[in-house]
Amino acid sequence: MGILNIFSKRQKALRGETPDVYQYETIPQALKIQIIHIIQDTVGNRSGNGYGQTLSDKVYHKINKDLSKEYGQFSLTNRNDGPIFDRVYEYFFEESDVEKCLDIIELTFLLIHTYVRENFIRFQREEGTTQEVNDAIDELNIRFKQHGVGYEFSDGEIIRVDSQFLHSEVVKPTLNVLQVSKFLEGAKQEFLSAHSHYRHKKYKESLNECLKAFESTLKAICKKHNWEHSANDTAKRLLNICLTNGLVPSYMQEQFNQFLGLLSSGVPTIRNKESGHGQGSEIKNVSPDLVSYTLHLTASNILFLSECEKKL
């Protein structure tokens, strides 16, 4: 991995100058430059110069085309000359809108995660790339942490990180479980969607996706074990079915009854009270802190239930 623990970095750490809390409003220019270095090392930046597109040209043209279309523009920049790499990442370097910068990072690393990975030998041979795909993704996430920027690329998407401890101990293990458990594919998509809505400040939508992910996990467990249930069962009903069928060991029954009370008053109730019903005569604002709490509570619940299911 292309990260060096150089003298100046060690001295900053000794002086306590490294960030210990995350911020979300800016992406430092130094971080942007480091990200561009990672992209060059993994994708390359060799231009065809009028003699046909290189592999790296294809990546950068797709980024320019896809994002321009989404933004309702003909191109990310007004420039028509020079390599497409320069045009895309000059735009990235000069853009002050954090979400648009994250769009470029997310789409670039999604293509690294898929297209570059599938053609890795060709990229090495034709583009002279030196950095492997997993190494590039790992370095991106480490660079985010080094700069105290609260985002991470995970499972093809940029997700927001609110607490390093909670993220490493709760969210990441949950994503790993959802990734490897094929019967939880629906819950995975909904959980990632909840994070995506949260990052874009669509807090009510995020709460709805939290509940969907939680309920999908319960339904998937019931379906996998042929426990009688209905597609319209509520989260509370699904929890009771799982308990009745021994999802939790009997010696933990009393403790889990208390946990059931927490679950019943947690994700489902938060969603029902805050986003599941009409607003009435007043517009209801959902607190981002409440949504952050709900995301972590959802992750904890999914992880716990998945671990219990493995032991059946």
Image: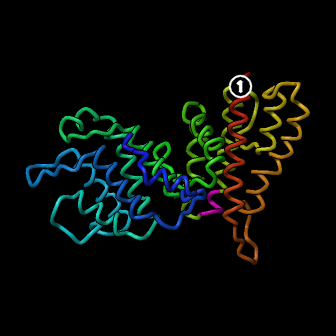
Res 71 → quadrant: bottom left
Res 270 → quadrant: bottom right
Q: Judge whether residue 223 is colored magenta.
A: no
Q: Position of residue 66 (x, y in %)?
A: 33, 57
Local SS, label 1: loop
Q: Is residue 197 visible?
A: no
270 relative to 188, above or below: below
Q: Position of residue 63 (x, y in %)?
A: 31, 55
268 relative to 2, above or below: below
Q: Residue furthest bottom?
A: 281
Quarter of the picture containing the N terminus is: top left
Magenta stretch in the rendered image:
202-206
Q: Position of residue 282 (x, y in %)?
A: 74, 77
Q: Position of residue 260 (x, y in %)?
A: 84, 41
Q: What residue is pinned by disc 1?
A: 226
Within 10 Å of disc 1 (Cα), the crowding (few <14, some 14-19, many 20+) is: few
Is 227 on the left or on the right of 108, as rendered? right
Is 43 on the left or on the right of 192, as rendered? left
